[in-house]
Image (cartoon, helix red, strand yellow):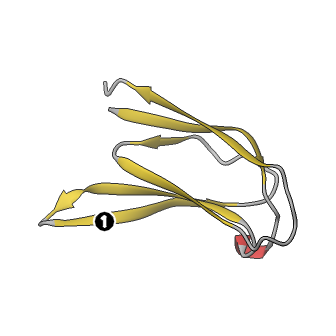
Amino acid sequence: MLARIYFEDFDLEPSFDCWLDRLEIWELLPPVDNSTKLVQLGTYCGHGKPPLHIIHNDFKMVLISDRYDRFPGFEARLKYIDNV
């Protein structure tokens, strides 16, 4: 089964290379030769919505913050779709 991740709102602290606050999206690829691999799909910060992501496997979203300035954050939606 596939999953689609999209963002209704996104507003994290902007910084060069998303150094201060950021959202990372990772996908866990299926095992090959008894080893799994995490692939980073993107790192996002600032005010623009991240692009739509289609996830084929397990995934994780990691929010990293320096805890100094306050920004509204984000609202993400996850929708499972049939694997056609």
Picture coordinates of residue 36 (x, y %)? 25, 64
Residue 46 relative to residue 3: left or right: right
- Please identify the quarter of the rendering in which residue 70 is found: bottom right
Picture coordinates of residue 43 (x, y %)? 61, 62
Q: Quadrant of the N terminus?
A: top left
Residue at 83% of width from left, 50% of height from top? 72
- What count of labels does the image hold? 1
Residue at 68% of width from left, 64% of height from top? 22
Q: Relative to 61, say whether 74 is above or below.
A: above
Q: Relative to 31, say whether 74 is above or below.
A: above
Element under label 1? strand
Q: Nearer the viewer, residue 80 or 16?
A: 80
- Residue furthest toward the front? 67
Residue 34 relative to residue 70: left or right: left
Q: Nearer the viewer, residue 65 or 82?
A: 65
Residue tagged 1: 37
Picture coordinates of residue 39 (x, y %)? 41, 63
The amino acid type, in three-letter code, at marker 1 is Lys
Mark 1 surroundings: few (<14), some (14-19) or many (≥20) residues within 10 A: few
Residue at 85% of width from left, 56% of height from top? 71
Picture coordinates of residue 10 (x, y %)? 75, 47
